[in-house]
Image (tube, grey):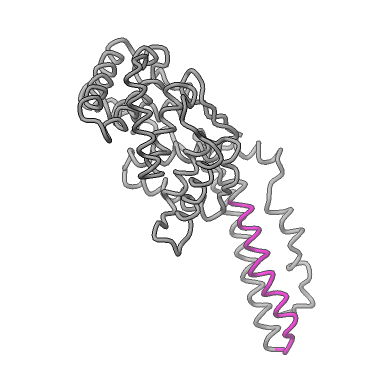
Amino acid sequence: MSTPEQQPNTMNLQSLETELSLSKAEMEEFRKLPKEEQERQKNEKLSKLKDLQAKLDEAIQEAIQTGQIEEAKRLQEILGKGTADLEEQIYITEGLFDPERDITAEDFVSIIDMIKKARGNRWDVFCSYSADVKLLFPEKASELGLDKDTWLGIEDYVQKSKDSARSMGNNYWGSYMVALKDAKILFPERANELCSDGRVWQGMKDYIEKCKDESWANFSAAAMNAMIIHNFDFGLNLDDVTWGKIKKYIQELKNKDSALFDEVKSRWEIAKFKILFPKKASEFVLNKQDWLEMNNDLKTARKNHDWSKFIWQAVMMKILAAEEVKVTDKGLEIVMK
């Protein structure tokens, strides 16, 4: 075996980075490849990275055995930091979510089958997953069967949710807002006719204020739904003070020493706040581990045929990977990079 001094090219991280990473133009071409080819190329790069790690480890051991302690420390720093940086670059560059690439035709068929079974039987399930599909694939909304009869079923479901909210109060307002938000995404023009009642507006506002005092998770969900329903914040008071409290809440969710620690919930909160505070949400940066875990969760849901979890995970990832998320008179527009 050659000595570390005889292997300078193996340790040249700059040249390796050029070999393993992709330029912006190359990334655009990479995204056009079939999913199988993308996986093959990605695995090939990671294999090269693992080869480098093995060679570095061998060189470290040889340097220690020959008494070259400083050389061993230098190589250890490369192994511990340089390769980790490269691995992160590979995953971050290629790992951002793209529904067209990461959701297969078979996935889509399974999701549509689930939605068809819910139609007429569980309008809450039908609305929720249909709205998610429309957010993921706006161009495929025609496959959801959004006809007149479908609207009548949704209208009845939303009306019953409103009646429950007005008679029962409390968390029933949250369920009503979810129903109306989904209806807005699926039938934006018609859904506007359902939310013209001033007493209903006041009921939603009172519920949101109650959530602000009791639960930031419920507040963020209710506030997001309200914005999508009405295409503006209608007095939500999303000021810097509110943002500061929300930011602290997310930081606690991401802190492993906190009693509130919950990585999955923290990512969903960041997705919601990307809608509520588009100019501030960028303060939360997702790292390599976040994207690896989210991709693994998506694959696990697919493997288990848990399509409800799969589609929830996919929508969250699309929002997090988006260039911009805009509340419009059509509901929600997710603009990808």
Q: Is 34 situated above or below 189?
A: below
Please tell me in which quadrant of the rendered image residue 223 appears. Answer: top left
Give the mark count: 0
Residue 125 or 178: which is nearer the viewer? 178
Residue in the picture at 39% in, 32% down: 108
- Looking at the rendered image, the quarter that the C terminus falls into is top right
Residue in the picture at 69% in, 69% down: 78
18 horizontally vs 322: left or right: right
Q: Is 121 situated above or below 300?
A: above
Q: Is 125 situated above or below 69?
A: above
x then y, percent, for residue 334: 53, 29
Residue 302 falls within the magenta-colored stretch: no
x then y, percent, for residue 123: 26, 25
Residue 75 falls within the magenta-colored stretch: yes
- Looking at the rendered image, the quarter that the N terminus falls into is bottom right
123 horizontally vs 39: left or right: left
The secondary structure that most of the magenta stretch takes on is helix
Please tell me in which quadrant of the rendered image residue 163 appears. Answer: top left
Q: Which residues are magenta?
A: 66-91
x then y, percent, for residue 265: 41, 48
Residue in the picture at 32% in, 19% down: 199
Residue in the picture at 79% in, 78% down: 5
64 horizontally vs 140: left or right: right
Residue 150 or 274: which is nearer the viewer? 274
Please tell me in which quadrant of the rendered image residue 24 appears. Answer: top right
x then y, percent, for residue 47: 59, 59
Residue 52 or 174: which is nearer the viewer? 174
